[in-house]
Structures are given as C-alpha cells and as structure tokens.
Image (tube, coloured by chain):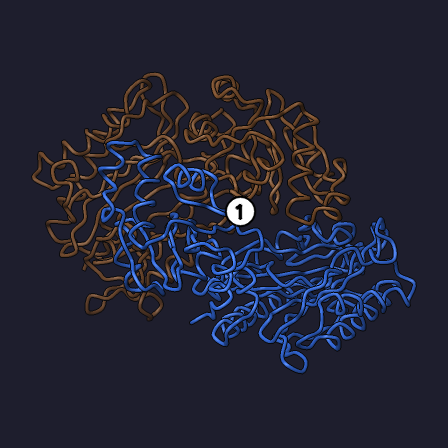
Chain colours: A brown, B blue
Amino acid sequence: MNPDLSKLDAYIEEADVDGYLIEADGETSDQRYLSGFTAPDPFVTLYTGETHLLVSALEYGRAQRTARADSVARHTEYDHRENIAEYGPTTGKHRTLAAFLDAHGVESVAVPEACPAGTADGLREQGVVVDVDYDGVVQSIRATKTDAEIDNIRAAQRANEAAMARAESLLEAAAAEDGTLLYDGEPLTSERVKREIEIELLRQDCALDETIVACGRDAADPHDRGSGPLEAGEPIIVDIFPRSKETGYHADMTRTFCVGEPDETVEEWYDLTHEAQQAALDAIEAGASGSEVHAAVCEVYEAAGEPTLRSDPETETGFIHTTGHGVGLDVHESPRVSEQDAELKPGHIITVEPGLYDPTVGGVRIEDLVVVTEDGYENLTDYEKQLVVGDDA
Amino acid sequence: MNPDLSKLDAYIEEADVDGYLIEADGETSDQRYLSGFTAPDPFVTLYTGETHLLVSALEYGRAQRTARADSVARHTEYDHRENIAEYGPTTGKHRTLAAFLDAHGVESVAVPEACPAGTADGLREQGVVVDVDYDGVVQSIRATKTDAEIDNIRAAQRANEAAMARAESLLEAAAAEDGTLLYDGEPLTSERVKREIEIELLRQDCALDETIVACGRDAADPHDRGSGPLEAGEPIIVDIFPRSKETGYHADMTRTFCVGEPDETVEEWYDLTHEAQQAALDAIEAGASGSEVHAAVCEVYEAAGEPTLRSDPETETGFIHTTGHGVGLDVHESPRVSEQDAELKPGHIITVEPGLYDPTVGGVRIEDLVVVTEDGYENLTDYEKQLVVGDDA
C-alpha cells in the first residue's frame, strides 16, 4: 500500500516544521499507517518527505525487510549505550532521538496529540522545537482508503459475516421455554453467543475486540455489551467489529434478531430503522456532508414521531447516537457521520447504523459498512436483514 | 482491591505538585489501577490524596457505580458544551479539564511519561503547571501486588495451564511422517496449535494477546511467534501469556516440547535450563536483587560453556535475553529480573524464564511465574516440565 502523503507534505509546510514525528508502538494506527511497520514496543518514525525509522536492535532486521521506509536505523548508530551510561535511561534516550533528528537535518517537528509528553518535553530540553498537531493530519489522510485498504476491509467483513451467521444459527436452533431461550437444554446466554462469535472470528484469523449481544434492557443501552440469558420475543442486538490479525483492518456490522414473534412496537421500529438506513444510504455520495446523511435518518424517525437527539438533545430514548463513523485501522475513525459537517470523499469507508432504544421496549439497530464513491456508495455488507428467526411458536 | 498509595502521596510531596493526573483509556494499566475503572475512551483521574474522576456523560452512571473514587464528575459540570462552542473542540476540552482541576484546588500536576503531549501543552496554556513523572511512580506501586491481585493472576495462570494442556495434547496425538508432524492426516502447523490455544483461552474467559508456538529456526529467535509445519525431533517452544477479560490481569508460562527423540544437544540444553531455572528460584527472596537472580542463571550456563550476554554482550547464541519480568495488568511490568539492580519485595510477581538459542539447534525455554515472599517464593505455576511427548518412533 502506498498512501498519498501530499496532505502531510502540505501540513509540514504550513506548520513550518522540518518533519513529522511519531513515537508509538505498531498497534497505534497512525504509526502503522505512516511506517508500514508494526512492533509490540514503541519505535520512531520521522517523515520529512522521506520516511525514516529508528528502532531497537531487536526489530532492526524485520524493519529493514518489511517497513515502508527510505531508511531504518538502530539506536546504537546514535551512541545510545554511551548516552544511557552517561545521562541515564531518560535523558540518554532523548539525546539518542535528538541525534537521529539532527542526522536528518531536523530541528523542529510536529507530533500527534497522543505523542508521549515525556518525549515532547525531553526533545525540547535537547533544543528541538516540538509542536502538537491538534488537527490529526495523519488521521485525516487515513480516512481516504486506497484500493488495497478497501480489499483488507472487505476481507474482514467476510469474516464478520461468517461470525454473524454463527450467531444467527445458534438463535435459530434455540427453543423457547417460559420465555427463555434454551440451546442443548441449557439457557442460551449472551456470553455463549459471544464466545461462539469469537471462536468463529479466530478461525477466520481475526482478533477479538469486544462483541455486543444484547437483549431486552441491555439492548436499550447502545454501549451495553449484554449479559445473561436471552429471551424469546425480545429484540437481540448483535454488533460485531472484528480486526484482521494480518492486516490490522476492521469491519463492523449489526443485525437485530428476534426468536419467535416480536411485539408490534419492535416490528414497527425494525421497519422504520430499515427505512432510515435506506434514506441515509440514498444521501451518500462524494461531496455530501456526513451531517446530511445523519439528517436523513433523523427525518425518518422524527416523521414517525420518534425522538432524536436533534429534536430533543436531552432525550434518553429514541435515536440517541450518531449515524456512523469511519472504519479502518481503528474501528472508530474519521469521518464522523453526525450533526457535524464532514465532507464525504471517494474512498471514505463509513458505517450507517440507525437505531431506536427504550428500556421498556429494548433496542433495534441495523448497521452496514459502505465505501463512498463519486456518485453514491458501494455496500461492503452482504448479510440479510430479517428480524424474526427460529422458534415462532 | 485497595492499593497502598502512600508512595504516590510521597511522590506528590517530593515533586511539590498539587496532584497526579492521568488521562488515558481504561486499558492503560496505570489508569485502571488508580481509578479502579475501565472504559474504551479516555477519561481523567486526578489523585490528590483523594481520587477524583472526570468522565463523559456516557460513562457517568457506570463510573459512579464501579470506580474506586471519592468523586465522579461529568464534563457538563464544567461548562463543557459552552467551552467547545466558544473555543472549539481542542481548547474547549482543555478549559473544561483546567476548570475540573481548579475545582479541586489544583494548580500543578505530575503526569506519567505517556500522558498525551496535546493535553500537557493544552493545560499549560491554561496556566496549569505540568511536570512529567519520568520515574513512573504508579508503575512502581503496581509492582507490589495485593492478595486480591495475586488471586487474579493465579486464576489467569489456571486458564494458561488449560491452554498449555490443549497444545500438549495436540502434539501428543501427532504422528511423525518424514520428519513432519501430522494431525488428522494434515501437517500440524504452528498456526493450528496457536488457534487451539486461543480457543481454549476464550473458553476460559481470557483475552488473546499473541501466543508463541515456535519450532526449529523460529524457536532460535526468542521474539519469533512461529509459523508453518512443526517438525518431529525438534524442540517446540510454547509460550502463552493470557489476560483475564474480567480482571485484566495476566499470567505467563513457557514449556518446550519435542515430539519423538530430540538430539543430544537439545536434551542437554533442556536439563541445563531446568537447572538454571532452579538456581534462579533458589536465589529469590525479599531483599534479594533481580540482578542476583539473573546472575544465578548466567552462572549455570557459563559453567557449562554456554555463551550469555554477560560473558559476551555481542553474542547471538546461548542465553540472549534477561531472566524475567514482573507480570500484572501489563504482561511486562516492574520489576525487571536482569543485570539491573532491582530489589525484590514481598508481593512482587515475576517470571523466571531462562533459555538457550542457536539457529543450528533451535531453542529451549522454561518459564514459571512466582510470587516473592519474605523468605523465598511461591510458585504459581502448576504444570509438569517434560521435554519429550508423544510419538517416540
């Protein structure tokens, strides 16, 4: 993958610094994106138009082979041992880093907001100018995906669908007894379904972030992961967001299921949410704002008399979250699909996930993952939307 | 769990600041430890002798119920919306945080090295003095475990043993054909064994960090996770370090297996490593230094003519890492068991993991997890040490 870093060049020019510096481990998305390298311990990437890495001896060989860098250096090349011996581990480390910057003619750097304060202050003590990039320029570059990144997310979404199918098959096979779902004679719990989802994701070579399988009151809180026995006739929200172990890219999808007959409100909510999602999808195209997509959802809900945060900022029921978010190396990244103005561009990958919530009813949410294109969108999600599954006794 | 924070009180006094400030998500160990709270998004903990949290509205209820805090506040209590509207999201956020500090009479804070530079600089712009704690005082407090923490680690170690038993059973059941191990008629790979380990850990309600199943040349590099078919007659290093999903605490254990007859060098290395581990364990007691424990390992290896980093700092074969590390909320934490002086104290939990490596032979490592006690140690590991398993054809 060769990202287009022209925005970073422009940022460096505008900020009037010599380079952009990231010190973080390879699980930090800006770091992985800029360096093309991942490692468990923090390492340094300096971007000056060229990309230069500073890594430990342990990571040196692998960084040389796999990083997307114009040069890779080891600490020892900058008298690291001598610096530590003479100045101690903290100042010694900062002197080594300052010497690395100096070797690349860099006297001033911008750093991400999350740069360790210890490193920023330590470099300043060595005479380096360190400015914080509060705009998150690398994050904004990451919002637009290359074709290779889209393929990575597509692959993670295929894994996601396999996991969702596993969850649905458990629900389908469950039998209702006194309102509680049984599977193999035992109560079917949120925990059991989550475990089977996670095992399927492992088989698909995906890592496990959290998974949501929430029923009843749990489902009425969009941030509740769910726990305990699942009930017949109640909406069950299943929200899965795996990360490919190999590529680091995520997918994200939600379906709501009901084993047996839901009550009328849940059915209405489901149809309304489906309609709201389609209205949002219809509003997506390059040049549109995330706020227009969000407004399309609010309009459908409000027209049906459901509260939204737009119609009542204090509401605790109805549509109480935003419409979506970017997905990539982070499961939540730019752009936001909310009341904020955020221009959609070709190659943005966003979720579209309207939902309705009320503790007295439960919750309903439907979420697809799409790529913004010049004249619309491509839906990366290939999974049926059907509320009622299994035991319809 | 009620940690003893008297060292933090002393640090604040010594550093001449009004409080200690952590802004991080709940997966960050210092944050989880000090607040007793975990959340996916960053929140703020201020320690002044009392513990005060500042969280989003979303987390407020849960923080009130579950955090170990004297007070929990929401951003809205400090005019957050007005600040954002008037000063934008960045400065607005810093003004809210400064107002929270001011409400607690705090004009100066110490922060961990990893504190976001954006927050440190932003608070300084609001007139707050921000000093970086390069000593990592919370990390040093975390090194000494309470009884509740020891129980958490013990429970994670039980899960670890179940996963190791699963790996061993796969190896036991494998058949050698032309030197390659077969299982169910297919080549048994590192990836397959890792997957079964991870599935077992999921069943034990543990999260998955990486796992090492490394054979042959892979095993000769202590940082190689291993890949591809496993070979008969070769040492296979299995290193598992799970984290309990519920408590966040880790365990850590390594065993080395050989399916069928190993060559003589591997057998010698195994016995020697076993002996080195016992020598290290015998050196552990409160008041001893980690460097003495590490020296005990080096002495056994050097007496047998094996190179160590002590006898030859440039060696790439022999004993090429340190003896161990602390384990807790982080899988690698204080104290180190290395050539550095680090006094062992009752309640420290450390690994003891000597090993020998050479690309022409492979690698051997044996790792147990122990608690330091007044007069020795308690071994938390309950898993046999036996090199040869299964097919001895």
* Residue at the extreme bottom of the image, as rendered: B375
Tell me residue A50's x, y (percent): 63, 22
Tell me residue B289's x, y (percent): 71, 69
Q: For the residue marked with disc 1, what is the amino acid?
A: Asp
A201 or A130: which is nearer to us?
A: A130
Locate the N terminus of chain B and report the quarter of the image it occupies: bottom left
Q: Which residue does the numbered mark 1 point to in the structure image?
A: A205
Q: Is residue B181 above or below residue A107?
A: below
Q: How many marks?
A: 1
Dot 1: element: loop
Badge 1 crowding class, 10 Å Cα cut-off, few under 14, some 14 to 19, many 20 or more, is: some
Q: Is residue B393 at least partly visible in the picture?
A: no
Q: Report which quarter residue B308 is drawn in.
A: bottom right
Tell me residue B37's x, y (percent): 38, 60
Q: Is residue A186 above or below residue B93?
A: below
Relative horizontal placement of residue B55, taking residue A308 as reference (left or right): right
A210 or B309: which is nearer to us?
A: B309
Relative horizontal placement of residue B146, taking residue A240 as reference (left or right): right
Q: Is residue A112 at least partly visible in the picture?
A: yes
B146 or B176: which is nearer to us?
A: B146
Q: Is residue A214 above or below residue B50?
A: above
The residue at 66%/36% (across/down) is A97
Relative horizontal placement of residue A364, taking residue B96 as reference (left or right): left
Locate the C terminus of chain B and report the quarter of the image it occupies: bottom right
Q: Residue under mark 1: which chain is it in?
A: A
Tell me residue A4's x, y (percent): 52, 20
The residue at 36%/36% (across/down) is A382
The residue at 62%/73% (across/down) is B345
